[in-house]
Amino acid sequence: MVTAQEKRQAYELWRERCRQVQSVTDTSALRPETPAGRERRKARLLANYAAFCEYYFPHYLQLRDKATGEVIRTIHNAPFHNEAARTVRDTPNLKAVFMWPRGHAKSTHLDIFLPLWLMFQPGRLINFMVVVGKSEDSAVRLLGDIQAELEANRRLTADFGEQKNGGSWLDGEFRTNSGVKFLACGRGQSPRGLRDREARPDYIVIDDLDDDKRNEQLAIYWCAKEAIYKKMSQYNVDFAEQIEIDDFRMRGEGELEATFIQKDGFEEELRLQYMTFDRHILVWVAG
């Protein structure tokens, strides 16, 4: 649990981050443009993820001389960054795992650049984003990075208007002027059933949860779903929508409770047993 003092320190660091973002994204030195030219530039940036990132987030993608502040070079997106962005934009109801090496900007792109690119698209492609971290505190920090851009990035404000509205990343949620909601969620807290008026989460990013114990638990979940699938002997089963496994505390062996949801809505309760040994996992339907 974060103390009041730690919360104040976190807020002061965030305020300093906002000042840095404001300074680097200052628009006063940019070339003047007509309203029509501005709209053409925005359309080009919204169509091109790489160009969007380089224009709106120079503080992430430019290396500067520490003494003079002069730009030394721009760090361009890798092809896989741009391909991932296009895949997310063009694939409704996408469920995906993006496995990039450490240090290849997974959180920067998937937690900040990409949702903002989707948010400002014509027709707005996200309305309710949930950030899931190893803990609620880590998810809250990720949320702070997004709010810093929405409130302090002068280039975003100049092109898309003031975004500041109610809520704070420190409290785990906030909303923009345009009505987009952002929420932090720790591992083990399910976003299922969350609703914001008529909207449910439509962009959920699970950030860097990789650890051996969690991987083993996820493997048990998957083995349980496979066991239920074979038990039910049905075709075209949607593992995400039709098979639900209750949360459980992982041990060397134990019991699982699950629900299989028929396509007509009928729910069948199931009980499973699992056992782990020598890096192997055995799961079977017990009843």
Image (cartoon, rainbow, N blue to C red):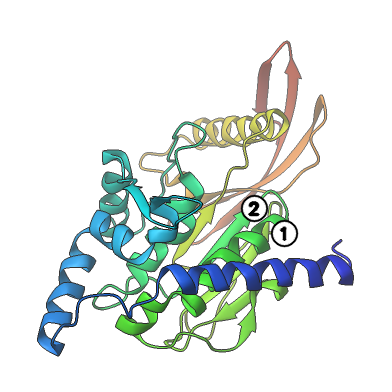
Q: Which residue is drawn at 32% across and 54% down?
A: 88
What secondary structure is found at the residue carrying circle 1?
helix
Q: Name the residue under label 2.
A: 133
Q: Where is residue 222 in the image (x, y as percent from the top left)?
A: 57, 34
Name the residue type under label 1: Glu
Q: Which residue lies furthest to the front in this view?
A: 67
Estimate the x, y position of residue 286 in percent, counting from the top left. 71, 31
> For residue 284, which quarter of the picture?
top right
Task: Check disc 1: other Cα within 10 Å, few if <14, some if 14-19, many if 20+.
Answer: some
- Quadrant of the drawing holding the N terminus: bottom right
Of the residues shown, which amino acid type is indicated by label 2? Answer: Gly
Horizontally, is 276 left or right of 90 in the view?
A: right
Residue at image coords 73%, 27%: 274
**Whole-Å distance between the Cαs marked 2 and 1?**
6 Å
Q: At numbered mark 2, what does the secondary structure look like: helix, strand or loop?
A: strand
Q: Which residue is drawn at 33% across and 80% down?
A: 28
Q: Which residue in the structure is indicated by mark 1?
A: 136
In the figure, residue 221 lies in which quadrant?
top right
Relative depth, front residue between 82 and 276: 82
Q: Is residue 42 above or below residue 218?
A: below
Question: How many neighbours does mark 2 have within 10 angstroms: few (below 14), some (14-19), or many (20 or more)?
Answer: many
Q: Is residue 128 in view?
A: yes
Res 192 seen here: no
Q: Residue at x 33, y 66 (%)?
A: 117
**Residue 173 image label:** none
Residues at marks 2 and 1 touching, judged by CB atoms closer than 8 Å:
yes
Q: Where is residue 60 in the image (x, y as percent from the top left)?
A: 44, 55
Quarter containing the C terminus: top right
The percent coordinates of residue 227 (x first, y second) are 57, 30
Q: Is residue 135 above or below residue 98?
A: below
